[in-house]
């Protein structure tokens, strides 16, 4: 069986005392399509920022394309493209980073 493109176990993201992502597990295999659905504040954007190597996880295991985002973020970002729901820029990224991420 091929290695998952995205592998997360116990993935957590906290902002101070607020827990935005609370221990999710997910595997996405080559050829699969996936999406995150949920109400505002459910952690969808925070999860995608961790997968996109924009925001580091607080704890848990995350592997993207077989690589560790904490150590290999630039190599992962060089191979990812993002299609946002709305035509807007990510305020947490610089103009250059937004162009690289969304202009693929």
Image (cartoon, grey):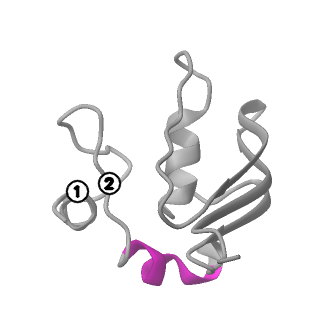
Q: Earlier in the sequence, mark 2 or mark 1?
A: 2
State which quarter of the image contains the N terminus.
Answer: bottom right
Q: SS at mark 1?
A: helix
Residue visible at 52% across and 17% down in the picture: 40
For disc 1, the neighbor class at 10 Å (few under 14, some 14 to 19, many from 20) is some
Residue 82, x across and y down, in percent:
32, 54
Q: Quadrant of residue 39?
A: top right
What is the magenta range?
A: 71-77
Residue 62, x across and y down, in percent:
70, 64
Answer with left or right where residue 22 lies relative to residue 6.
right
The numbered dot on residue 12 is none
Residue picked out by circle 2: 82
From this view, report whether residue 48 is shown above or below residue 59: above
From this view, report whether residue 25 is shown above or below residue 15: below
31 in magenta: no
Residue visible at 18% across and 62% down in the picture: 99
The numbered dot on residue 102 is 1
From this view, report whether residue 40 is shown above or below residue 11: above
Q: Overall secondary structure of the magenta stretch?
A: helix
75 in magenta: yes
Q: How many marks?
A: 2
């Amino acid at each position: 069986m091929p290695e998952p493109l995205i592998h997360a176990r116990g993935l957590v993201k906290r902002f101070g005392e607020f827990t935005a992502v609370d221990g999710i597990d997910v595997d996405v295999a080559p050829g699969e399509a996936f999406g995150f659905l949920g109400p505002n504040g459910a952690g969808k954007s925070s999860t995608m920022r961790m997968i996109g190597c924009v925001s580091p996880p607080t704890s848990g295991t995350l592997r993207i394309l077989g690589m560790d985002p904490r150590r290999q973020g630039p190599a992962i970002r060089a191979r990812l493209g993002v299609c946002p729901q709305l035509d807007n820029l990510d305020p947490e990224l610089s103009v250059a980073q937004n162009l690289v991420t969304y202009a693929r």
